[in-house]
Amino acid sequence: MNVWSKLLTAMRGGAQEAGEALVDSQALRILDQEIRDADAELHRSREALANIMAKQKLAADKLSKVSARIAEYEQYALKALESGNEALAREVAEKIAGLENEARLESEQAEAYATSVANLRQAVQQAEGNIKRLKQQVDVVKATESVQKAQLAVSQRYGGSQAKMHTALESLERIKQKQAERGARMEAAAELAVEGSPDQALEEKLRAAGITPASGSADSVLERLKQRSDS
């Protein structure tokens, strides 16, 4: 019984680890969807705010109209009193009292709408700020994730190709060695071409020592001209 209990516990632990691994692997996708859901809720909140603001405006407009009618009937009542028609003035006063009750209700409703607008506007602004900061953090996380994946890929390729890298370096060294040998042979061939035959080498040494004049020199030309002049 104890063994079976441990096995079940191990299975539950494995399932938990597998579930966490799945969630971690899809974390960015889940976070993107949660942000989209939050944007949708924010959109509905803005629509609700616009609806309440419209009702507040209608209530304020109605209150303004009722207040204007009260002022109008007050003038009528004053004129009735001035003409001595108190019965008519009382009737107008009753009308004014009803309008004042209506105005009080409209005023209370407009104030309630105004309070709701202020609270909802603040909540919408706070939600907008939170979502904006969250999106910025997600952008940073995505960029970091991309960089780390690139670093991991390079590390794995480099670590798994040490033998290939070593072989490539050896091939490179052999190519450099062959190029150096070829360059040395080309330099030697150039030196041999300059040296030419043994007699030519001896003449070059005599001219270098100043014993024989260099061909094409001013001294050789002047000597040749003197010989032609003497003849």
Image: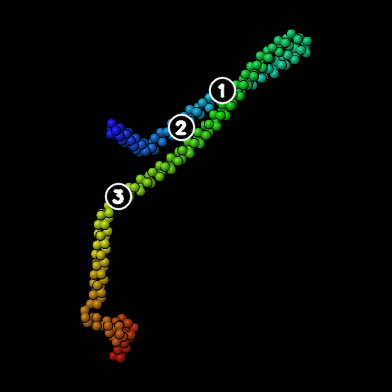
Name the residue that disc number 3 marks: 157
Q: Which of the 4 image quarters holds residue 5?
A: top left
Q: Which of the 4 image quarters holds residue 214?
A: bottom left
| 3D distance between C-alphas at marks 1 and 2 | 25 Å
Q: Residue at x 72, y 10 (%)?
A: 90
Instruction: Label 2, secondary structure: give it.
Output: helix
Q: Which of the 4 image quarters holds residue 8?
A: top left
Which callout, 3 or 2, points at the residue further toward the start of the chain?
Answer: 2
Q: Classify residue 27 as left or right of residue 198.
A: right
Name the residue that disc number 1 marks: 55
Q: Amino acid type of disc 2?
A: Asp
| Residue 185 placement (x, y as % from top left) | 24, 70
Q: Residues within 10 Å of mark 3 (few under 14, many from 20)?
A: few
| Number of the front mark, 3 or 2 | 3
| Residue 119 placement (x, y as % from top left) | 56, 29
Q: Amino acid type of disc 3?
A: Arg
Q: Residue at x 31, y 81 (%)?
A: 216
- Which residue, as the protein is rendered here, is positioned at the far front? 2
| 3D distance between C-alphas at marks 3 and 1 | 65 Å
Q: Work out whether residue 178 can be spotted.
A: yes
Q: Are marks 1 and 2 in contact (CB under 8 Å)?
A: no
Q: Residue at x 76, y 9 (%)?
A: 85
Instruction: Label 1, secondary structure: give it.
Output: helix
Q: Classify residue 151 as left or right of residue 119.
A: left
- Per the rendering, the mark at residue 39 is 2
Q: Amino acid type of disc 1?
A: Lys
| Residue 42 placement (x, y as % from top left) | 48, 30
Which callout, 3 or 1, points at the residue further toward the start of the chain?
Answer: 1
Instruction: Label 3, secondary structure: give it.
Output: helix
Q: Is residue 24 above or below residue 153?
A: above
Q: Work out whether residue 8 can be spotted.
A: no
| Residue 159 placement (x, y as % from top left) | 30, 51
